[in-house]
Image (tube, coloured by chain):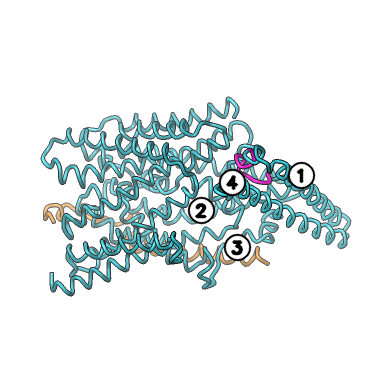
Amino acid sequence: MSNIDLIVLFGTLILIALIGIWQSRKQANLESYLLGGKSLKWGTIGLSVMATQASAITFISTPGQAYENGMGFVQNYLGLPIALVVVCAFFIPIYYRLKVYTAYEYLEKRFDLKTRLFGAFLFLVQRGLAAGITILAPSIIVSSILGWNLSLTILMVGVLVIIYTVSGGTKAVSITQKYQMLIILFGMVVAFFVIINQLPDRVSFGDAVTMAGLAGKLDVIDFSFDFEKRYTFWSGILGGFFLSLSYFGTDQSQVQRYISGKDTTEGRMGLMFNALLKLPLQFFILFTGVMVFMFYQFNQAPIHFNKTNLDFLATTEYAEQSATFEAWSDKYHKARMKGYELIDQGIRRQDTLSIQDGTAQVLGATIQIEETRKQMKNLISKADPDRKIKDSDYVFITFIMNEMPAGLIGLLIAVIFAAAMSSTAGELNALASTSTIDYYKRLIKSNASERHYLLASKLQTLGWGIFAITFALFATSAENLIEGINILGSLFYGTILGLFLVGFFMHKISGTAVFVGALVAQVAVLGCHFATISGYLQIGYLWYNAIGLLIVVIVGWLVQLVMGDK
Amino acid sequence: MDENQEIEFKDNPPPGFKSWKTIYLIVLGNLALLIVLFYIFTKVFNE
């Protein structure tokens, strides 16, 4: 990285952190620390909600996903706007009416203390582990590409987040998230136009889009009822709805963002902002990935995007074979470029035969390039069966490092770190609120001064920050960490959502009945998961949400039936 | 539930509209429009 990139990178990150600290320097009591003094406007809430959800992985992995599999992933977000409407209509009025600090306070008011503590416990376990992964996953990718020390990268992200989250609380988190999100959006738009600009002169934007369509990368919507397909309209609208309802309605890291508004209007407008913009934003990020794919049709792509794997191969007995594959990849790329030249000539001379020959050459070379990529992955697996061979997470960052002009590299690496920091800050802030309000204030010290609780909240934010950094530093396996965040959420979201939906809509069910339902649901979901990883069952993790939710509702209802009227 | 909290709570309409239902309909209409546009996009570039 050049000096100008380093200045842009560190300048951006430190400036955002300083703005957060400065704008939230006066924290007089618990409300100002945990709810931002209930003074945030809907624009800040909207961007803050967006920044909390969009982790660094969104900006690293999503373009790579489109590069590899096209744009079908956008369907995962189809249920999100519907879920946000439900949150605005049913969840927000209840949270504001009860003036809660955390979502789990509602569970005690509607059911009883044990249900509240159980809901809060599930959140703390899931989010506590996720906070570590949120720092670790992008640090692994960025440190491997930049050649930085992994532990130092984790410490840099973690310590910077802890400084402004501990000192400024919710207001600092939301204000920094606003600026981080603006930097992220600006960086992605600039990246998109740079990619378009890097396409060869003879290829217009329209040509590139048409060719991407021919390569099958622009299949956005798939209405088929094929359950084996990972992304379809139906799985997106149903699975996405329940996942988003759990996440936005009951996860304190999101609830805390929208209950920090002056009134329900600010919170609702912040969520409606997301309901309108989230799908177009995801479409845009995926489309950027497709354009990176098009760029590499005319420019030589690395045979494997994770350079660490190639460097590793060079030290093994397979080094010679690896060099041969790289030479083949060069040869096929040159053949493809000759094919494009033939097509160009054919178009200029209106020679159909030349166009047909060129097209056949391009298609043949492309198939060979893909085949060589697969062979290289197999070779890496052969050299080390435990090594992660999926390289799509490295596509976009490799493109940034190799093709972007100086200055812009720093900005886009800042985008990735800003996204990691904004998600982590939201998580630490929510973890501290839950452990302070739902456990410390409720069970340990219920009549202390505001000053005491303010200090306790700050110390707990610090404690969760140290926990997240320690987890990230000592997690030895990098394998599947990114997917781990999603699996972790799905293990607990169904049960938590079940508790809230029973509370809102099944008025005859009491605390004890729903508590038993939740316990059974959690054991059943964990059982399903362990049975799946042991090979006894085949259940996709997105189904855990529906299973957990249904068991809470059915078992809760049955237990209430046995117990008699409330 | 604290009765005073109930009294203090006021559910305001959205800025520029009479009720939240209108905003919800706009959001759901926007979703339907995006699905139609995505479908057309898929069809146009898949042929």
Instruction: Quote the CA–CA distance across marks 3 and 1.
Output: 33 Å
> Would residue A409 be counted in the magenta stretch?
no
Q: Chain of mark 1?
A: A
Q: Earlier in the sequence, mark 4 or mark 3?
A: 3
**Mark 1, secondary structure of its residue:** helix
Q: Which residue is mark 2?
A: A282
The reply to whether residue A178 is in sight is no
Residue bearing the label numbered 3: A219
Read off the chain for label 3: A
Q: Are marks 4 and 2 on the same chain?
A: yes
Residue depth check, mark 2 versus mark 1: number of the one nearer the observer: 1
Query: Mark 4 to mark 3: distance in Å?
Result: 35 Å
Q: Quadrant of the N terminus of chain A?
A: top right
- Colour that chain A carries in the picture: cyan
Residues at marks 3 and 2, CA–CA distance in whole angstroms:
14 Å
Q: Earlier in the sequence, mark 4 or mark 2?
A: 2
Pointers 4 and 3 in contact (C-beta within 8 Å):
no
Q: CA distance from mark 2 to mark 1?
A: 36 Å
Where is mark 4, residue-wise?
A384
Q: Amino acid at mark 1?
A: Ala
Mark 4 Cα shell of 10 Å, populated few (<14), some (14-19), many (≥20): some
Q: Earlier in the sequence, mark 3 or mark 2?
A: 3
Asked if the residue at tag 2 contacts the one at tag 4, i.e. Cβ–Cβ closer than 8 Å, the answer is no
Q: Which residues are magenta?
A: A302-311
Q: Residue at x 16, y 54 (%)?
A: A113
Chain B in the picture: what colour?
Answer: orange
In the displayed structure, does residue A145 sit left or right of residue A431?
A: right
The Cα–Cα distance between marks 4 and 1, rounded to whole angstroms, is: 22 Å
Q: Chain of mark 4?
A: A
Secondary structure type for disc 4: loop
Dot 1: few (<14), some (14–19), or many (≥20) neighbours within 10 Å? few
Question: What percent of the width, then of the height, locates residue A145?
Answer: 58, 37
